[in-house]
Amino acid sequence: MALPVDGPRSGASLFPPDLWPPGPPPSRESFPDPPAPLTADELDACISSGDSFSDPRNAVSAITAARLVSALRPTSDAPLTLLWLTVPALPNLPAAWNPEAALERHYGPRPAALILSPLDSPDRSLVFLSPAAANRTHPFPLADLVANAARRAVQLDSPDARAVLMAMDVQHALATLPPPAPPAPARITAAPARPRDLRLPIAAAVFLAIASAIWWLRRRLTLSPRPILLPDSPAAPRLSAPYSAGHGASVRFHLRRP
């Protein structure tokens, strides 16, 4: 299909030659090349540099980069080391690159996190936690914080403004995280009581009962009433009277037990 400029010129043409001049098609060099993919060495260099903000593909302007560095400046009471990596678009990460191993290699027992945020779509940001940050009793909810910040940032028109707002929101939310609740005291379940061996107490009680019975019976037989035979003890008459001169006489005997 030929354009009207190639046909006979008339005032009724929808493509007047002053607006649509004929010319060669645009060359391939006029289109910008897509950014080169990030390599594993570049990613490790961003982690090992210790900088809170990295921009290996110059995705943002110098002024925006300075604002991001200021927004992500670490504080002495920061709960973890936060690394922010900005790229023009979400790249295909190298298959052999392990972000968790790289964070552990450079930060060891210190909790650290890497946020890879594409400038064109901040809602597709990737979050990587080091083993020291992921294996805590109360892990950092960094993925939720980044998702909440991205929902606010996509409402802005400028990509640089979105990056700054998102970084500020994440840093502020991370610094104001409430301390984790102390763990509930573990309930100590008492072990089932072992049944007591009652043979020895029963044997002692039976022995005591038998001994008490023998003692009582022996005492009963020993102190039981027996006939007492008093010896004949004739009283001598007094004043030749058979009845002791009108007074009673008493005789005392002593009982001797065998």
Image (cartoon, rainbow, N blue to C red):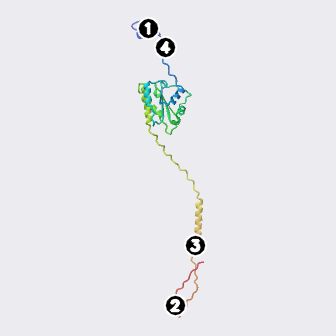
Mark 1 crowd level (few <14, some 14–19, many ≥20, 10 Å Cα): some
Q: Which residue in the structure is indicated by mark 1?
A: 5
Residue name at image x 49 percent, y 90 percent = 246
Up the image or down, 135 lies above or below 22; here it is below
Q: Residue furthest toward the left? A: 11
In primary-sequence order, the first of circles 3 and 2 is 3
Q: Give the CA distance from mark 2 to mark 1.
A: 186 Å
Residue name at image x 43 percent, y 26 percent = 64
Q: Give the CA distance from mark 3 to mark 1.
A: 148 Å
Which-is-in-front pick, marks 4 and 1?
A: 4
In primary-sequence order, the first of circles 3 and 1 is 1
Which secondary structure, mark 2?
Answer: helix
Q: Are marks 3 and 2 in contact (CB under 8 Å)?
A: no
Which secondary structure, mark 4?
Answer: loop
Mark 2 crowd level (few <14, some 14–19, many ≥20, 10 Å Cα): some
Of 165 and 190, nearer the camera is 165
Q: Which residue in the structure is indicated by mark 3?
A: 219
In primary-sequence order, the first of circles 4 and 1 is 1
In primary-sequence order, the first of circles 2 and 4 is 4
**Residue 158 x %, y %:** 42, 24
**Residue 87 x %, y %:** 48, 25
Q: Which residue in the structure is indicated by mark 2?
A: 244
Mark 3 crowd level (few <14, some 14–19, many ≥20, 10 Å Cα): few
Q: Which residue in the structure is indicated by mark 4?
A: 27
Tell me the amino acid under the disc marked 2. Ser
Residue name at image x 59 percent, y 60 percent = 200
